[in-house]
Amino acid sequence: MDHGELPIMKCRNHPERDAAALCQKLGTGFCTECCACRDVAECCGCLDPQVYCTFRTQCLIWEMSRQRRNNA
């Protein structure tokens, strides 16, 4: 790794895969498979939805999990 390169975030559920979405509050990532999953309990979703998050209004993970919860 060059000094100018940042390390690549890995998926929380699949550590061998690169993350496609990142939780800025908790610093965790999810791969594309987790983000495409439709199972509310097993997918890319907010890990702490009851606690205030500064980043929520711009959070891809929150929006995807909100849509899943509404469709469940």
Image (spheres, rainbow, N blue to C red):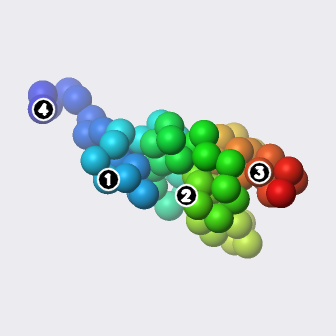
Helix, strand or loop for disc 3: helix
Q: Amino acid at mark 3?
A: Arg
How far apart marks 4 and 2 lie (CA) works out to 26 Å
- The disc at residue 68 is 3
Q: Earlier in the sequence, mark 4 or mark 3?
A: 4
How far apart marks 4 and 3 lie (CA) works out to 37 Å
Residue 22 visible in the displayed image: no
On the image, numbered disc 4 is attached to which residue?
A: 1
In this view, the mark in front (1 or 2): 1
On the image, numbered disc 2 is attached to which residue?
A: 25
Q: Earlier in the sequence, mark 4 or mark 2?
A: 4
Q: Nearer the viewer, residue 33 or 44?
A: 33
In this view, the mark in front (4 or 3): 3
Q: Nearer the viewer, residue 56 or 67?
A: 67
In this view, the mark in front (2 or 3): 3
Q: Position of residue 47 (x, y in %)?
A: 59, 65
Q: Position of residue 59 (x, y in %)?
A: 66, 44
Q: Amino acid at mark 1?
A: Pro
Q: Earlier in the sequence, mark 2 or mark 3?
A: 2
